[in-house]
Every structure is written in structure tokens, then in C-alpha cells.
Image (cartoon, rainbow, N blue to C red):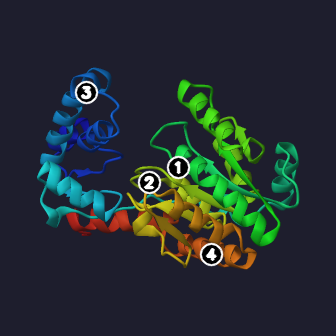
């Protein structure tokens, strides 16, 4: 809203981009039974947030959502004109992730106890019902069994950014119930500069969240040459091409998730093919210079050169 006020005072065009939207966040919280509307409003102040969002959106000259689907939602839920929507994705600093630093990857594998026959599946996210740890845990026994039968290798699940919370304890108890504790590695939060080596040490990335608008971790994994198995809700469905650079699965279907992960980590040649394609897609579409040029094209619409 403050950006709109400055644009109005200076008589210049105003562009509006969103990280997340209050109406969608509230609807998702209600759908996941996180509380009543009154409880959620007391916790997140949704009423005030949505009011400010609406005012900011009502006065923008262009709208820059991260995905096509997000733009459609903005138009429907907030009543913005579709002809002013210009999708502008996130980007990634590709040289930070490619090529792989083999020495750092080897050192990390040794540090966390990965052996030469281990095949790690990575998930980096806060421990939260929306971030997909539970979905990966439920699919893990089948993945572990089938990959072992197919290739003789041991699947390991790497959870990065694990912290001690009631929800984390609930997930840990489920891991014990399923008898897969020896296949799960819990790792604490790490600095951003340390993240690339976790991709390099892994064989695939599981983006099993219930909804993600356009997660940068997806681009980071792809830039590192990792194939991704992602749920269909949100941005990944607009980025990944199933069978080309990863796979898309239904959010609550653990069998689909398991099948896709087995395809990726159970066949070394397939894993390398998918990963190489994922990296190439980032180079062609999602580096920051390419995203910056898209932004400049929108500015040129509103402030023509000369």
C-alpha cells in the first residue's frame, strides 16, 4: 500500500507483485482445519491484510504474479482486470549451483553418514503440514523397498531445516511406526550459502508440499541438475514437464508420489537425463538476467523510451 501512495504522490506508474495472498492463505488454512475464521483472524489478522491488499491491487497499473494460475486467482478473488496481468516468475543465480563442487558434496556425504550405495531424496523446508514432509514419509517405505529390489541401493530421506516442534515430533513418531528410521536423516537449518552442497549430495528433490506458488528451492534444485518430483498444486505444474525434467503427482496420493520417486532414483541413467534437462530449462528461462529483462519489458509498456 505504501508503494501505491508513493506512486500517487510522484505521479508515476505503479506495479504490484505478490508473494502470497491473504484470501488464498486464509482459504488454505480453513481447508486444512487450522482453526475457525475467528481464530485465524486473531492469529494472522487476515481481515486487515486482505483490506490492504485489495486497496493496493485496485490502484495498480500492472499486476505481476509469479504464475499464470496466481494471476487467474487474483482476477477472480480480487476483481483485477486480466488485461493488466503480466506473469513474472522467480529466478535463480545459476552459477551458485552449477557445476557441482564434487569435493564439497563428498565431504557432506561423509559428514552425515551417506555411503556409496545410498540414494538420497532431499526436502528442504520448515517443518509444517503444508510443506510435504508427511507426504514424503508416507511414500517412503514403498520407495525404499522398490529401489532396493530394482538396483540394490539404499534410499535415504534427507530433511533439511528440521527443528524440534510438536509437529516434528509427530512426524518422527510416524517414521518409527513405519519402521524406516534408519532411512531418514534429520538435519538442522543451514545458511543459504551452504544449501548447494545438499543438492549436490542428493539424487532427487521431493517438492511434496500441499501448495507452493513458485518456490525458489525448485529452481535451485533444477539449477543443480536434480530431477524433481512435485505436487501439481501451484507453480511447479507451470515449470516442470513430466517425463522430461521431473514428474508431477496429486497432492494426497502417496502411491503416485512413490511411483514417481522410484522412476527417478531407481534408474541412474533416467535420473541423469531428467537432471540435465532440468538444469538446461533453468539456463534458458529462469536465470535472474532473463527475469530482469521480462520486468524491463513491463516498465517499457508504462514508460516508453524517449
Viewed as shown, does residue 44 lie left or right of 108? left
Viewed as shown, does residue 125 lie left or right of 202? left
160 or 55, which lies in front?
160
Task: Please tell me whether residue 150 is drawn above or below residue 81 in the rendered image.
Answer: below
> Where, by quadrant of the figure, is residue 76 drawn?
bottom left
Residue depicted at x 50% and y 75%: 242
Per the model, the C-alpha gap separating discs 2 and 1 is: 7 Å
Label 1: how many Cα within 10 Å (few below 14, some 14–19, many 20+): many
Task: Please tell me whether residue 77 is drawn above or below residue 93 in the rendered image.
Answer: above
Per the model, the C-alpha gap separating discs 3 and 2 is: 23 Å
Q: Earlier in the sequence, mark 2 or mark 4?
A: 2
Residue on which the image places disc 2: 252
Q: Which mark is residue 135?
A: 1
Label 3: how many Cα within 10 Å (few below 14, some 14–19, many 20+): few
Foreground mark, 3 or 2?
A: 2
Residue on which the image places disc 3: 36
> Where, by quadrant of the figure, is residue 3 drawn?
top left
Label 2: how many Cα within 10 Å (few below 14, some 14–19, many 20+): some
Q: Which mark is residue 274?
A: 4
Per the model, the C-alpha gap separating discs 4 and 3 is: 43 Å
Q: State if disc 1 and disc 2 touch (CB < 8 Å).
A: yes
Label 2's element? loop
Q: Earlier in the sequence, mark 1 or mark 3?
A: 3
Q: Earlier in the sequence, mark 4 or mark 3?
A: 3
Q: Is residue 242 visible?
A: yes
Amino acid at each position: 500500500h505504501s508503494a501505491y501512495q508513493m506512486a500517487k504522490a510522484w505521479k508515476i506508474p505503479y506495479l504490484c507483485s505478490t508473494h502470497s495472498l491473504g484470501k488464498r492463505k486464509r482459504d488454505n488454512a480453513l481447508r486444512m482445519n487450522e482453526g475457525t475464521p475467528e481464530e485465524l483472524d486473531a492469529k494472522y489478522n487476515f481481515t486487515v491484510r486482505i483490506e490492504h491488499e485489495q486497496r493496493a491491487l485496485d490502484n495498480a497499473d500492472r499486476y505481476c504474479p509469479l504464475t499464470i494460475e496466481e494471476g487467474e486467482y487474483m482476477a477472480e478473488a480480487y476483481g483485477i482486470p486480466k488485461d493488466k496481468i503480466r506473469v513474472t516468475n522467480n529466478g535463480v543465480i545459476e552459477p551458485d549451483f552449477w557445476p557441482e563442487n564434487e569435493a564439497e558434496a563428498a565431504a557432506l556425504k561423509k559428514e552425515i553418514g551417506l555411503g556409496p550405495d545410498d540414494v538420497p531424496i532431499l526436502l528442504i523446508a520448515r517443518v509444517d503440514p503444508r510443506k510435504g514432509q508427511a507426504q514424503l514419509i508416507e511414500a517412503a517405505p514403498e520407495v525404499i523397498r522398490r529401489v532396493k529390489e530394482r538396483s540394490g541401493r539404499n534410499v535415504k530421506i534427507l530433511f533439511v531445516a528440521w527443528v524440534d516442534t510438536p509437529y516434528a515430533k509427530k512426524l518422527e513418531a510416524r517414521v518409527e511406526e513405519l519402521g524406516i528410521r534408519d532411512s531418514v536423516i534429520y538435519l538442522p537449518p543451514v545458511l543459504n550459502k551452504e544449501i548447494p552442497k545438499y543438492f549436490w549430495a542428493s539424487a532427487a528433490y521431493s517438492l511434496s508440499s500441499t501448495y507452493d506458488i513458485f518456490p525458489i528451492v525448485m529452481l535451485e534444485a533444477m539449477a543443480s541438475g536434480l530431477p524433481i518430483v512435485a505436487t501439481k498444486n501451484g507453480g511447479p505444474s507451470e515449470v516442470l514437464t513430466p517425463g522430461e525434467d521431473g514428474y508431477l503427482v496429486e497432492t494426497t496420493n502417496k502411491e503416485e508420489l512413490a511411483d514417481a520417486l522410484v522412476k527417478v532414483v531407481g534408474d541412474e541413467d533416467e535420473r541423469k537425463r531428467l537432471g540435465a534437462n532440468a538444469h538446461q530449462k533453468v539456463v534458458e528461462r529462469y536465470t535472474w538476467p532473463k527475469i530482469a529483462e521480462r520486468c524491463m519489458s513491463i516498465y517499457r509498456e508504462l514508460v516508453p523510451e524517449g
